[in-house]
Amino acid sequence: MTKSCKLRALDAIVESRALIKENSISMSEGCPNPECVPIVDASIKLRDGSILEVTKDEMKAALQYGETAGKPTLRKWLTEFQRRVHNPPTMDERGLPSSMDLIITSGCSESIDQTVDAIVEEGDAVITEEYLFPLIFLNTQTNGGRIITVKTDRQGMSSSDLDQLMSTWNELTDGKRPKVLYCISSGSNPVGITCSLARKQEIYQIAHKYDLLIMEDDPYYLLQFNKPNVASFLSLDVDGRVIRFDSFSKIITSGARLGYISGPKQLLDKLVLHMSSSTSSASCLVQIFVLKLLEYLGHDGYLRHGDDVSSLYHKNAISAHEIAKKHLEGLAEWSMPDGGIFIWLRILGIQDCSRIIANTAEKGVAILGGSALTPDKRKSNCLRISFSDQSKENFEKGFAILASAIKEEHDRMK
Ligand SMILES: Cc1ncc(COP(=O)(O)O)c(C=O)c1O
């Protein structure tokens, strides 16, 4: 933990809440008068036609400040869900610092930010893959930390490269020994790879040997295309060295800004202290809406919904793959993603895609370049294509325009 994280103390107002008994006259809080709130109750209409009612009492609670770690009822539902899906070995070790706990956040973005803030300080090294959703880079670098990259192959982060890195690390020449490894386990953003179970077991053993904390960022866990889903790092965690981030963004809605962290209680307690002085808590209103939906669906229904979303994305991925073959064969290479919402293209014969991206943008097709997904914004010949929300017609048009932009770039280089 960072020095500032160790110094974190409970806000005295939050601390004073422990003194409030069930039916106390509470003159201590700064809560607005519920009579002034214009909203009374709500009905949520679902796609299947069902109506979920948020009663007046539920709404009254949802419209006030809530517990920093999240609504106890939502935490309980999700804790049982984690047991069902990941069965974490540390879950029932009550009272140990390594026991698994679960807190609610405003999504994986906040989970990454809070965790990095608690554990990365000046000179610390964080191990990641070469191309990644960039929040881990930005947060680590903002805290004065360094990113050390390890290669990725079809099975995920290379365990042999990781072992080589850790076994040859020299603190005199390489600086502080890495203490954290960040990994997007399933259908990775951007490369679309799911880390295999065998690879996770190897990485976990290396993490155990060199005492690394594993940050498992896994918003696409339920969106794996090959079922059953590959087990998570959390499900392997006998030491209490995994902190796992889940999100409702890709399964229910990104507008909810809601996610959760599962990990060692000792660390989560510190994150809650930080949240109490920053975000305060995820929106209570959103927590109630999502909890209503989860209670309606149950664990089985939520998993079924995840499977449905995954099937839709799998279909889109196949369309994108087939249409890309038609337009891009000989110009780019790629593999069918294992899950998530991205196809990762490597453009052939080109070192830097920036002019191609500018060219397609000019012609009305937005594509993200690999450079934006590296820790140092280095030149890249890779492109990330999202297939979550595109029609076949859009893939046809988009890939045709991309193909012509690649050919124009080849011509320019002659
Ligand atoms: C790997 C990864 N982590 C985190 C996030 C952010 O998720 P959230 O919407 O829960 O903040 C994304 C979103 O695209 C992502 O791909």
Image (cartoon, rainbow, N blue to C red):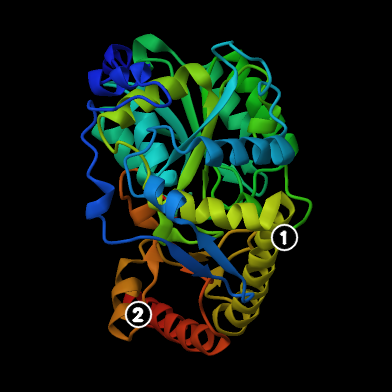
The label number, if any, that marks residue 262 in the structure image: none
Q: Secondary structure at mark 1?
A: helix
| Left or right of 37, for residue 87 | right
Left or right of 178 on screen, residue 413: left
Sequence-wise, which precedes: disc 1 or disc 2? 1
Asked whether residue 144 is in view, the answer is yes
- As measured in the structure, the alpha-carbon distance from the residue carrying label 1 to the one carrying label 2 is 38 Å
Q: Secondary structure at mark 2?
A: helix
Between 59 and 317, the residue placed more toward the observer is 59
Q: Please, is residue 127 above or below residue 49 in the view?
A: above
* Horizontal and vertical percent position of residue 308: 68, 66
Query: Which amino acid type is shown beneath numbered disc 1?
Result: Arg
Residue 86 lies in what quarter of the image? top right
Q: Where on the picture, by quarter, is residue 281?
A: top left
Q: Position of residue 408 (x, y in %)?
A: 37, 82
| Quadrant where the image shows the C terminus | bottom left
Q: Report the amino acid beneath label 2.
A: Thr
Side (left or right) of 289 relative to 98: left
Residue 397: % across, % down: 47, 89
Quarter of the image containing the N terminus?
top left
Mark 1 or mark 2: which is in front? 1
Give the quadrant of residue 3: top left
Give the residue displayed 28% in from the left and 83% down from the top: 362
Point 32% across, 12% down: residue? 6
Residue lying farthest right? 228
Specify few, some or many for label 1: CA neighbours under 10 Å numbering under 14, 14-19, or 20 or more: some
Q: Residues within 10 Å of mark 2 (few under 14, many from 20)?
A: many
Which residue is disc 2 drawn over?
360
Indicate which disc residue 304 carries.
Answer: 1
Q: Is residue 348 visible?
A: no
